[in-house]
Image: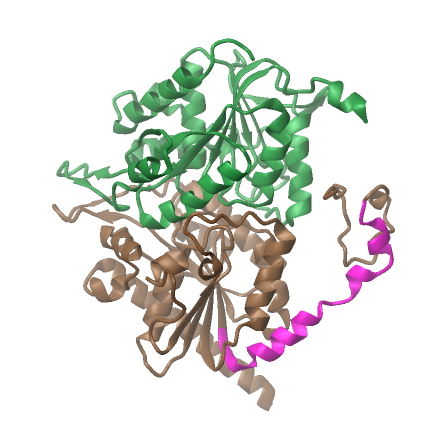
Amino acid sequence: MEAAAAEPGNLAGVRHIILVLSGKGGVGKSTISTELALALRHAGKKVGILDVDLCGPSIPRMLGAQGRAVHQCDRGWAPVFLDREQSISLMSVGFLLEKPDEAVVWRGPKKNALIKQFVSDVAWGELDFLVVDTPPGTSDEHMATVEALRPYQPLGALVVTTPQAVSIGDVRRELTFCRKTGLRVMGIVENMSGFTCPHCAECISVFSRGGGEELARLAGVPFLGSVPLDPELTRSLEEGHDFIQEFPGSPAFAALSSIAQKILDATPMCLP
Amino acid sequence: MEEVPHDCPGADSAQAGRGASCQGCPNQRLCASGAGATPDPAIEEIKEKMKTVKHKILVLSGKGGVGKSTFSAHLAHGLAEDENTQIALLDIDICGPSIPKIMGLEGEQYMEDNLGVMSVGFLLSSPDDAVIWRGPKKNGMIKQFLRDVDWGEVDYLIVDTPPGTSDEHLSVIQYLAAAHIDGAVIITTPQEVSLQDVRKEINFCQKVKLPIIGVVENMSGFICPKCKKESQIFPPTTGGAELMCKDLEVPLLGRVPLDPLIGKNCDKGQSFLIDAPDSPATLAYRSIIQKIQEFCNLRQSEEENLISS
């Protein structure tokens, strides 16, 4: 029906959409999504996070929002606001689960249907940035998300990897996915990039080294930075605290702030 | 076109095509005709194929990046050290097939005489090829792997899975339903962010009645190669796997510490167990592998007793 195409919809007030992807699981997509959102918010932006990982929704916990209820409003679902100023909001399937330990055992078509709803039926209001966190892979969720967001012209994708060859192997495929679906790659972030032993200050490459930067070079995409392993960051996420605010002296802080700044620099100032 | 109603009763339920929520669903006519209710003939075919496979183990986790493929590969390596044991390793992570790299097999299909490996990774012509498939196509590939690969006489078939609780997991359990899976080994790291997904995976196993052999806590502590002191890179802020296993009454098979040599060996496609035989991680792996063998042997003798009684 033509009427649906003419309606601006719930994403009309969202200025910039960034997807956070990786072919590989467990590299820190949700961590980077969360920290990027927090950093953008600290830079004075209004940010929303959309968590489309239906099987493993991690973001509510990372922001201390587990167990929050989701309400319907006249325009659809109201996102969960994380602060009184309403400068940071979140929607995740995690909020819809009656029991947090209950598995979402859905096949592709049902996941696609929910993602479409998530994209179109959340009343985000006015946002500077919408950060979309995805599960690992190049399958239903990714295709559904890219298709649903396509009319709103996402800024692009941030692709996360760890330094190891095993991660790079999967992330190369993700870059192909981006190319095939016409999604611009804003850059690669290498996470878990070394660990500084708290006892002797030796820096150890726990998960090998160098892969992210090398991949960016080979693929001809920007390398946005390396984030080291930082138990303070891990603990902050576990406990749902604002790492950007609490640990400005931490090794990961500098890297994350620099990545957020690069995103801001790459963002067009005026609306298209 | 792929819209499925929220309260879809399921294609194989008695209400398929007939329920209130079926109205307007594009598949309504198909379901109402009873097409979804007939069992897939592949299930019987796979049962026949699996008669020569003694033990089948699934390696699962709700969470990505906890070390499923690393563990699957080293379970295979460890078991294959006995030349008289035939091991098969099947990688059903269609989008992110890590096993060929970890086993040092990019471009080949076999390595040792008694260790066979299958993965969609072998079917891709370039390392940049992406497998951008929806659920049904992934399911078809898994069916082919189980039904059309000539596994031969195998003592242990280890199935490495992608993270999550979706198509691949449902399919492998559905297709192996008649062939009996010994059980699942579930991998986690100590963090709550992993445990919260792993609890869902345990819930999933219970829902589909898949026996759980036990949980392995990976990346459990880090010993600095320089000063030899331990630190927690991924702190167990909510009690780690130990407390979760106690709460859910599931065995904890062991804890594997982080050793930078593990990552290096996986990148090179070698067995970490051979490269670092004295590492605490190797000792942990070996103890866990032994417990898995004991579980499988116990299950086998229980079945034999049941048959003979």
Residue ID at (38%, 48%): A169
B176 or B25, which lies in front? B25
Can you say whether A259 is above or below B127 in the image?
Answer: above
Quarter of the image for the C terminus of chain B: give it.
bottom right
Q: Quadrant of residue A250?
A: top left
Residue A191, position as x, y percentages in the image: 34, 36
Range drawn in magenta: B26-55
Query: Does the stretch in magenta take in B52?
Result: yes
At 64% from the left and 31% from the top, the residue drawn is: A148
Colour setting: by chain
Left or right placement of residue B67 versus residue B248 in this view: left
Q: Residue at x 52, y 37 (%)?
A: A134
Q: Which chain is green?
A: A
- Residue A246, quarter of the rendered image: top left
Most foreground residue, A28 or A4:
A4
**Residue B49 visible in the displayed image:** yes
Q: Give residue B264's position: percent from left, percent from top.
A: 25, 53
Q: Position of residue A58 (x, y in %)?
A: 49, 37
Instruction: Considering the whole magenta stretch, tell me its main secondary structure.
Output: helix
Residue B138 lies in the magenta stretch: no
Quadrant in the picture for the N terminus of chain B? top right
Rendered hue of chain B is: brown
In the image, A73: left or right of A68?
right
Q: Which residue is at the far top?
A: A270
Residue sitting at the far bottom: B308
